Amino acid sequence: MRTAAPNTLVARGLIILLMIVTLLPFLSMLSAALAPQGTYPNGLQWPADPQWGNFVKAFEVAKMDQLLLSSALIVLGVVPVAVLIATMAGYGLAKLTTNKYKWLYLVFVFGLTLPFEAVITPLYYEVRALGLLNTRFAIILPLIGLYMPFGVYWMRAHFLNVPHDLTEAAQLDGATRWKEFVLVQVPLARPAIMSLTILLFLWTWNQFLLPVVLVQDPMQRTMAGALGAFQGQWGTDIPLLCAGSLLILTPTVVLFLIFQRQFVAALMQGAVKG
Amino acid sequence: MTDTISSGPGAPKPALRPSQRRGSRKATMTASLFIAPAAIAYAAFVLVPLGMSFYYSLLRWDGIGEARFHGLTNYITVLTDSDLLQIIGNAFQLVLYFTIIPVGLGLAVASAIRGQMAGRFGTVTRTVLFLPQVIPLVAAGIAWSWMFASTGLVNQTLKAIGLSSWARGWLGDFVWALPAVGIIGAWVLLGLCTMLLVTGITKIDTSLYEAARLDGARPWHEFRYITLPGLRQEIGVCITVTVIAALASFDIVYISTQGGPGITTTVPGLEIYRLAFAHRQVGLASALAIVLMVLVLISIAPVQWFTRDKK
Amino acid sequence: MRAYSRHALRIALTLSTTAAIAGTALAAPSCGTDPVVLNSYFETGFPLPSKLAEEFTKQFPNVTFDIKEDQFANMMENSPRILSEDNAPDLIRLPSLTDLVANNLLLNLDSYFTEFGWDKFPAGQLVQLRVEEGGRPRGTGSLFAMGLNYSMTGVFYNKELATQLGMAEPPKTLAELDALLAKAKGAGIQPIMQWNKGTAGLAFPLQNLMGAYGAPEPINDWIFQKDGATINSPENLEAAEHLDSWIKAGYFPSDANAIEYFQMMSRFIGGEGLFMFNGDWESGNLDTNTAGKFGFFIMPSEEDGGRHATMSAPLTFGIAAKAAHPDCAAFFLDWVATNEEARKINVAVGGSNPGGPTDLPMPAVTPGSVTEASLAAGQTLAEDNGAMDFIANATGAIFAAGWTPELQKMVGGQQTPAGLLEAVQEEYETQLSR
């Protein structure tokens, strides 16, 4: 089927150029991270005496271990719950409701393009009224809600493509429905659930606006929020800032490299469906 | 965002005979149990706050003291104040960079390679180009602040190739700060768009190209009449994602320029945050928030309509 | 709660000591003996508060500090929110007072003023920290903050470059300063190193020029939000025009809008720039790291022998109205000004006047150091009664929404001197009308 592409060389050259442009900022940060602390190094220049110790220092001052724990707790608080209730609702909307309830689906979909900034101010007062300000729940609870448009949309789309006869098993009562959902539908939906999990994990880990507004203590924030605080505190020291930034983005990059195929698939489908 | 699926084969049959009504009520009960948790979470942390945002937007309130009803004054301010209009304009200028660069370069790569990137080269390409999608935008902002710094790589390169007069403090320059922020966004979105378009182009029937070549079509015509229409959906996706990223941007600007110099890089997201939490004008902040939401919807709607699947 | 615990302490103390000892000294609030963690919010890049905290813990082991740091621009934006929340800091570096007082976010320190005997401090030092009920005007009314020290801005100079240009002694008039700047420019030396990103560092030279052209009182009235005060005066316009002529002459770095404060410091220390307008809080830093290389002088007046006036402000620290340990925080603030070791640290690390009771001796400084020069400049300023608060402290948002964008525009050639003052005045009035 495939004909030899006409401009393979040009294309490869272009792609390699894009890859270099993509990687340069990381390299530039690495070279700066190895410069002596408190100096203003040059953009990209391998230091004569690489200060690998900067990473140790950054690990300590950023309290990376605590940051990892905090981000992990937030992810654990958000992702399983969000995926579960989005899957349930996606199933409910796809298989258990008639067209009469399409409005409900449309209400969910309406939230797909909503910028978080549109609700951040009231969220602040709401979370404060709940007494959750400066706790991880200030990030966890709103995020679950904010992920519903995408999560429900995503899972509903999956369940709509499941052949009908599986559910045609008749007008089942609630308990049986539930059983069917858990034992038949969820296992079948594994790829969709997997992708959703990856996306929500990334979005949570990298969430910035919510922690900046709702949580002051960097130790209770997500990685991205903590990085913002790190920049606030150490932004005056370029080598340390670069070392800390690289450390903070390492965990997701490592996970990404391991699960490269799944991540890429999830991100591309996520964009298409979103 | 397409609703073609809802009328697809999976959609439940609406027919309900009277004898089924009892059962259907039961079914409705079951359905609502399945949907309720998501609906509650969504209502509590999206719909209610959105309603509150609208309510606040009608108030004059410092967030602490007593609020006064202010009518539509805040909206009038948003739509007439020259600073706020410039800030909204900045977001639309960012669209140019966030959208055109990734889509343009993505199209160039896709039509040049016109085939699935297989093998090791494909894997490496995918991995590298997706890296910016995986890291926090904050990290992208920090990395590029450093690239654009006075002693950063951009100036270093310019000096190395004899363009010293071009070296400048990019993020503090009235002309160049906004484009520089735009470049950061383009960098983040480039890989995603490229990969979407590269994947999309493999779905175009190659016989179309062969036929075109037999007819003596030039490469530009192939691109114009086969590639572009064939990629309509993918292009639509890229534009949607990048336009939202530009209009609702916050992280990158917050980290790299704090909105300066002057207000040349201030975007609505940053201004909402500042108005609400630093300047204590919760009403005005909320009005801007509602306007931003509407602007996103208005900008996305034609893209969705235009690139809808017409096959 | 707070009042109750203090009373309890007072009763306990009174009971456990002989009545012969003066009651007031004993009744003064303290940190007690139970473990206390002071929730503190400091400014990034300035080690003084943390150093003082360290020493304090050494002297009072039951007290430790939970320190969060952030950059000044962020602190300006965050402080109202942080102070309004439940775990509000016990000690916080404050950018501006009025709005915070208006919203009842800061603890009124009047009772501590009496209990600690702060009436022995020079009253002039505390003026800027007083605010009337409701947030304005400032300069009178109750005390809402204390200074960790009392700093002033002036001109730092690079001694080597100065010698190279034949500058035997600091300029005595504005014209002499201009001549030196022109000379530096002609010799290919960066005349002034100044930051203008994030916050507007050109506010320092601007205010110094204002002080050279006019009296400080009207400017203070404006900063203190007295009725009818304006920044848009003929003298200030002259100052702004003078600043603009410096910009146009290329005396500031062409990328000033991309230079952040700490970049400026690093470049100035690296030998880039004859002058730098900055505060004496850097004197200690320069003495420690680059002894003998830099000097400091007070901004010259327009005419020789004229009155000196410049920005001089406390390193403002307040206590949140909702603070958990207000007594201990107040005790810390008193200790900083009165404890001998603390005063030594204050001068050595900070380089500014430590304030405190007038009868306490000033810690010794190295002859020929920047600190010596800046403390002497402070003396001159006091004699001329020329202290002004910082023009960026007039309202909570005037720096972020007024001076910074407008001065950045001026550097970018997008704003005129008259336009600058008009725009800032307009922003000021909008903010006061809220």
Image (spheres, coloured by chain):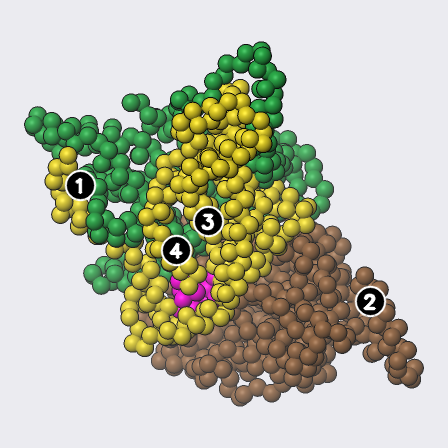
Chain colours: A yellow, B green, C brown
Q: Residues within 10 Å of mark 2 (few under 14, many from 20)?
A: few
Pointer 1 and pointer 3 on the same chain: no
Task: Name the spot of residue A91 as percent of width and height, x first.
Answer: 49, 31
Pointer 1 and pointer 4 on the same chain: no
As helix, strand or loop, the secondary structure at mark 3 comes to helix
Identity of the amino acid at label 1? Answer: Ala
As helix, strand or loop, the secondary structure at mark 2 comes to helix
Q: Could you tell me how far apart the alpha carbons at marks 3 and 4 are, in whole angstroms?
A: 11 Å
Label 2 sits on residue: C5
Tell which subunit mark 1 falls on.
B
Which segment is the magenta one? A231-246
Q: Residues within 10 Å of mark 4 (few under 14, many from 20)?
A: few
Identity of the amino acid at label 3? Answer: Phe
Identity of the amino acid at label 2? Answer: Ser
Give the prevailing secondary structure in the magenta stretch: helix
- Residue at 22 percent of width and 31 percent of height: B204
Tell which subunit mark 3 falls on.
A
Q: Which mark is residue A201?
A: 3
> Which numbered mark, 4 or 2, is in the foreground of this view?
4
> Which numbered mark, 1 or 4, is in the foreground of this view?
4
Q: Could you tell me how far apart the alpha carbons at marks 1 and 2 are, in whole angstroms?
A: 77 Å
> Which numbered mark, 1 or 2, is in the foreground of this view?
1
Label 4 sits on residue: A255
Q: Viewer-proximal residue, B127 or C420?
A: B127
Label 1 sits on residue: B112
- Residue at 25 percent of width and 55 percent of height: A20
Q: Could you tell me how far apart the alpha carbons at marks 1 and 3 are, in whole angstroms?
A: 34 Å
- Residue at 71 percent of width and 62 percent of height: C323
Mark 2 near mark 3, Cβ–Cβ under 8 Å?
Answer: no
Residue B206, visible in the rendered structure: yes
